[in-house]
Image (spheres, rainbow, N blue to C red):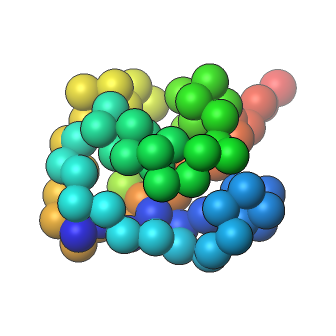
């Protein structure tokens, strides 16, 4: 199972620091997160960066989620 670790802002919406999911790809993972935690906003999740096992994924829509992964969603950081 993949473990999603929530940021402090996300924890305000989920009520928990982390949750596990059986989904094996990005799209089904985000759908499962929204079903379990309705306060999460689909548009906000899709606008966030994602890291799987510490690797930032720039275009995650078709990304596979390996079993026992740590997954983090976080705001994009703009550089200058």
The part of the image, by quadrant, that contains residue 14 is bottom right
Q: Position of residue 50 (x, y in %)?
A: 49, 44
Q: Position of residue 65 (x, y in %)?
A: 24, 51
Q: Position of residue 68 (x, y in %)?
A: 23, 72
Q: Quadrant of the C terminus?
A: top right
Visible residue check, residue 55: no
Query: Which residue sits at x=60%, y=45%?
Result: 38
Please say if 46 is above or below 53.
Answer: above
Query: Which residue sits at x=44%, y=31%?
Result: 58
Q: Quadrant of the N terminus?
A: bottom left
Q: Position of residue 5 (x, y in %)?
A: 53, 67
Please say if 53 is above or below 78.
Answer: below
Query: Which residue sits at x=57%, y=30%?
Result: 42
Query: Which residue sits at x=31%, y=62%?
Result: 21
Visible residue check, residue 61: yes
Q: Is residue 47 left or right of residue 60?
A: right
The part of the image, by quadrant, that contains residue 9 is bottom right
């Amino acid at each position: 199972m993949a473990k999603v670790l929530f940021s402090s802002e996300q924890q305000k919406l989920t009520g928990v620091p982390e949750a596990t999911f059986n989904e094996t790809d990005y799209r089904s993972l985000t759908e499962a997160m929204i079903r379990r935690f309705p306060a999460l906003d689909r548009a906000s999740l899709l606008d966030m960066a994602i890291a799987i096992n510490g690797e930032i994924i720039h275009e995650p829509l078709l990304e596979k989620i390996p079993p026992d992964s740590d997954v983090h969603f976080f705001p994009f950081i703009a550089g200058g």
